[in-house]
């Protein structure tokens, strides 16, 4: 009799554990789908907005350098690449390129201004 | 008392020193005449390379690169630019749609006209280069102008350079034309201005470091630079113009290049060619 009682109890316990296990996996699956939905919601929002504004700043710096004949070779290329990175959703890459282009634009302008007046080098003697 | 005298002396010395330094500083800013510039330009190179005969500067880097010169002389035995000269001759003689040719329409003294350029155009108040004059002629006769760096321009330039070989470089900066001197000064400024990410000027390579190596290449001296253009460059695999080379140089120092035959490069050509006054025209030529 005791044996029967013990077996019955163990079956009940196993069944209840199994039920709770099923419930947990169902909950996990539900959470996963919700998380997926969340990601989709984020993706729907416009990406790299801050980076895009930095690209505009960089392009303005490039234009300023160009206005005094001081644009560097690769600045426009970096800006183009940054735009492409924004389109591809690669915000970090876009930011790095915009930063580089901005610095080149600023340095190009400063360089051109520093060379505005003709300074004959010391080795050129009259 | 002693301290006061010392102080006065010190003041006197420092005033003199400052005045001297100021004068030195100012002298480097004062613009010299084109003649004295050319004299100083010539002196710089003749002092730097005392063994090089002056007339040899028309040969670019091969003026000072002995082993390179041997190769170049071998190349010149069967010049790679010859087919371009032939094509150019055909272009020169081919009538436009209106029946006129370059000679009858625009250049009656041709085809040996290269030595007349760059020149100050009194009517247009700008430096006129030969490729620009050729394109103006084409446009005036209802023809399509040529591209300035690649293509047919190199054929006709090779032919015209060949016809002017041996003529003296003689760029005139008319004294009664203030615009001409201003253009010359702009060209001079461009030559000595540092630009690009590498912060180099034209003079950094072709004056200050002429004769030294940049990687495996010997930097050519600026004196006589325009003489051999257009040049067949092995790197290009074709003939190219002086302004194409300007573009390449600017890109190499990581600066954005200017428009070929735009005001910047035209003025630069005016200054650079004037510095070689007295040397011979020797184009077309072959280069690495």
Image: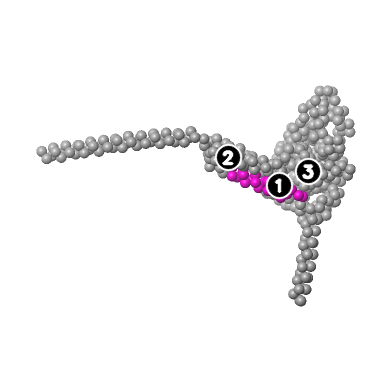
Name the quarter where the C terminus of chain A is drawn.
bottom right
Camera-nearest label, 1 or 2? 2
Q: Which residue is mark 1?
A: A112
Coloring applied to the structure: one colour
Callouts 1 and 3 on one subunit: no
Camera-nearest label, 1 or 3? 1
Q: Is residue B238 visible?
A: yes
Relative to A19, residue B95 above or below = above
Where does residue B107 sit, x and y in percent of width and height? 86, 32
Task: Give the dominant element type of the magenta stretch: helix, strand or loop.
Answer: helix
Q: Are marks 1 and 3 in contact (CB under 8 Å)?
A: no
Q: Nearer the viewer, residue A20 or B85?
A: A20
Relative to B78, residue B200 above or below = below
- Per the model, the C-alpha gap separating discs 1 and 3 is 17 Å
Chain that bears disc 1: A
Query: In the image, what residue occupies the spot 72% across and 40% down?
Result: B258
Helix, strand or loop at mark 2? helix
- Per the model, the C-alpha gap separating discs 3 and 2 is 38 Å
- Per the model, the C-alpha gap separating discs 1 and 2 is 26 Å
Task: Describe residue B71's horizontal placement relative to residue B160 as left or right.
Answer: left
Q: Which residue is mark 3?
A: B268
Q: Are marks 3 and 2 in contact (CB under 8 Å)?
A: no
At label 1, counting other C-alpha atoms closer than 10 Å, the crowd grade (few under 14, some 14-19, many 20 or more) is many
Region of the chain picked out in magenta, as a range: A98-118
Query: In the image, what residue occupies the spot 77% across and 47% down?
Result: B189
Task: Describe residue B117's horizontal placement relative to residue A87 as left or right.
Answer: right
Name the disc covering residue A53, or none. Answer: 2
Chain that bears disc 2: A
């Amino acid at each position: 009799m005791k044996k029967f009682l013990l077996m019955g109890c163990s079956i009940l316990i196993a069944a209840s554990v199994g039920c709770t296990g099923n419930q947990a996996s169902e909950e996990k699956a539900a959470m996963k789908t919700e998380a997926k939905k969340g990601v989709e919601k984020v993706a729907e929002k416009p990406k790299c907005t801050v980076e895009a504004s930095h690209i505009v700043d960089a392009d303005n710096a490039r234009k300023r350098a160009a206005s005094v004949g001081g644009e560097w070779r690769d600045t426009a290329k970096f800006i183009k690449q940054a735009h492409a990175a924004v389109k591809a959703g690669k915000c970090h890459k876009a930011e790095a390129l915009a930063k580089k282009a901005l610095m080149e634009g600023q340095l190009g302008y400063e360089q051109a201004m520093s060379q505005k007046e003709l300074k004959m080098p010391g080795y050129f003697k009259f | 008392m002693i301290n006061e005298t010392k102080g006065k002396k010190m003041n006197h010395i420092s005033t003199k020193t400052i005045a001297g330094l100021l004068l030195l500083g100012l002298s480097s800013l004062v613009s010299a005449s084109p003649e004295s510039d050319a004299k100083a330009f010539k002196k710089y190179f003749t002092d730097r390379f005392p063994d090089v005969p002056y007339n040899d500067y028309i040969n670019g880097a091969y003026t000072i690169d002995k082993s390179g010169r041997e190769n170049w002389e071998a190349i010149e035995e069967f010049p790679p630019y010859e087919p371009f000269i032939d094509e150019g001759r055909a272009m020169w003689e081919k009538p436009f749609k209106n029946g006129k040719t370059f000679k009858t329409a625009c250049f009656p003294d041709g085809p040996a006209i290269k030595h007349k350029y760059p020149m100050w155009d009194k009517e247009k108040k700008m430096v006129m280069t030969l490729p620009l004059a050729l394109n103006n002629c084409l446009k005036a006769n209802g023809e399509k102008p040529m591209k300035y760096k690649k293509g047919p321009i190199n054929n006709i330039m090779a032919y015209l350079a060949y016809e002017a070989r041996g003529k003296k470089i003689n760029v005139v900066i008319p004294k009664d034309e203030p615009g001409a001197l201003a253009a010359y000064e702009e060209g001079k400024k461009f030559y000595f201005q540092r630009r690009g990410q590498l912060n180099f000027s034209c003079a950094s390579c072709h004056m200050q470091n002429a004769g030294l190596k940049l990687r495996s290449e010997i930097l050519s001296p600026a004196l006589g630079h325009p003489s051999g253009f257009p040049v067949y460059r092995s790197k290009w695999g074709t003939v190219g113009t002086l302004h194409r080379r300007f573009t390449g140089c600017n890109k190499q120092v990581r600066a954005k290049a200017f428009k070929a035959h735009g005001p910047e490069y035209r003025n630069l050509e005016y200054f650079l060619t004037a510095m070689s006054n007295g040397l011979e025209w020797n184009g077309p030529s072959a280069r690495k």
